[in-house]
Amino acid sequence: MALPRPRSADGSQIDIGPLEAGEEDAALDCLGACFRFAPDPGRWRHLYRDGPAGDAVIVVVRSGGALVSGVALLPRRIRFFGRWGLAGHVLDSMTRPEWRGIGIRSAATTLARRIARERGLLAVFSFANDSSLPGSLRQPTRRRVSEMPLLIRPFWPSRGTLASALVHGARQWSGSSGPSEPESAVAGPLPAGADLVARAFPEDGGWSAPAFDDRHTRLFERAEGVAPIAMIRDADHLTWRYAAAPGMPYRQRDVCDGAEVVASAVLRTAEIFGGRVALLMEWLWQRGARAAAADLVRDAVRSARAAGLDAVAALAMPGTAHRRSLLHLGFLPIPAWLAPKRVTFNVGPENEGDDSARWYEPSHWHLSWGDGFLL
């Protein structure tokens, strides 16, 4: 149901503040109205209350007893040039359609950033589409870092065929029908397609449901080639990120040397980009285990091809060791103009100082599909 918009933007009918106890149902109702889906309270709590870095900063805009807008900053544990801290991941920024255009979400974001600074968060970042990017960049210190650096290992015979297929996928994605799934983290990951992941990566082929322990924490701490800014990928984070749930689309494979995990990958399948694709969600290896890590990706490529998929896709920032390794394994970089959907990674440090410029350099970031929540 549409809510009446105030006759003026003087703020007299508006209250902006942190989400209060007992307002969860109202927040879910606002999410549903903004993203056009029926939110699951369990998924909302898992994402915003149960994460290893603590509760999200959630600021909402109220009018007449209803929530009409809001923004959430999910605290993410981050490693910044050897220093560990927290950064705020902007998720599910929302404003009911009839309330857009008067700046209330920007005001909510400003308050959320102030609270984040009080909690000691080092920076705020988001993965913004074309409609949300201008609002993100209006925030002080927030700058573009890079459009999402997509690489793809196609199973088509030529680059020309690849380009044609991606353009077709882009048209499908941006057409009036568009994807039916809401672009909300609370909606959960996109469906994988009926039995697609099981067919492509069966357990008897060495891929299993994700399970993580202290060995994976040590793997991240010892990982080779991880850029100096990275979200912490220890056992607590990975278990939360890839939590078991009905229809879970993820598969994992580890390489062990004695008692230790020396290389690990997490994959999923999805029907996106105009085709059926395997996504390399996570990929890490310990020093000296690069060959084992490469074999993991080669096995993923073989399995995906044998299952009739169209490609394997990955993300890796320009100038990073992970990107160089993927290029060596036959992945092709996709120009931003050809990508099926434009998403821009942007960040703003919350305490400007001598190291502020380091946040904006793409090669300083380790990013993968697993850093988002729509896949």
Image (tube, rainbow, N blue to C red):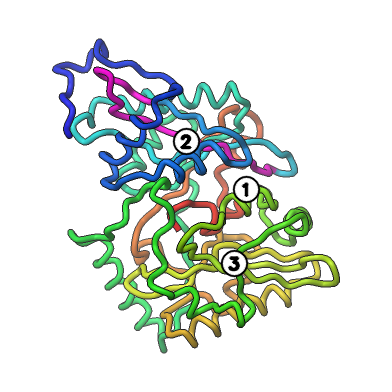
Q: Secondary structure at mark 3?
A: loop
Q: Which quadrant holds residue 238?
A: bottom right
Coordinates of residue 173 in the picture (x, y in percent): 28, 63
| Residue 209, disc | 3
Q: Which residue: 59% across, 67% down?
A: 209
- Mark 1 burial class by Cα count in 10 Å: few <14, some 14-19, many 20+: many
Could you tell me if the residues under marks 1 and 3 are in contact, i.e. CB atoms within 8 Å? Answer: no
Magenta-colored span = 60-80
Residue 304 in sight: yes
Question: What residue is shown with label 2?
Answer: 142
Q: CA distance from mark 2 to mark 3?
A: 38 Å
Q: CA distance from mark 1 to mark 3?
A: 22 Å
Q: CA distance from mark 2 to mark 1?
A: 18 Å
Q: Secondary structure at mark 2?
A: loop
41 left or right of 170 in image: right
- Chain-order first, disc 2 or disc 1: 2
Q: Which residue: 37% across, 70% down?
A: 271
Magenta stretch: dominant secondary structure:
strand
126 left or right of 164 in image: right
Coordinates of residue 26 in the picture (x, y in percent): 33, 30
User: In which quadrant will I find the N terminus?
Assistant: top left
Coordinates of residue 316 in the picture (x, y in percent): 55, 61
Question: For the residue marked with disc 3, what is the amino acid?
Answer: Ala
Q: Secondary structure at mark 1?
A: strand
Question: For the residue marked with disc 1, what is the amino acid?
Answer: Met
Q: Nearer the viewer, mark 2 or mark 3?
A: 3
Question: For the residue marked with disc 2, what is the amino acid?
Answer: Arg
Residue 347 in sight: no
Looking at the picture, does residue 318 appear above or below residue 308?
A: above
Could you tell me if the residues under marks 2 and 1 are in contact, i.e. CB atoms within 8 Å? Answer: no
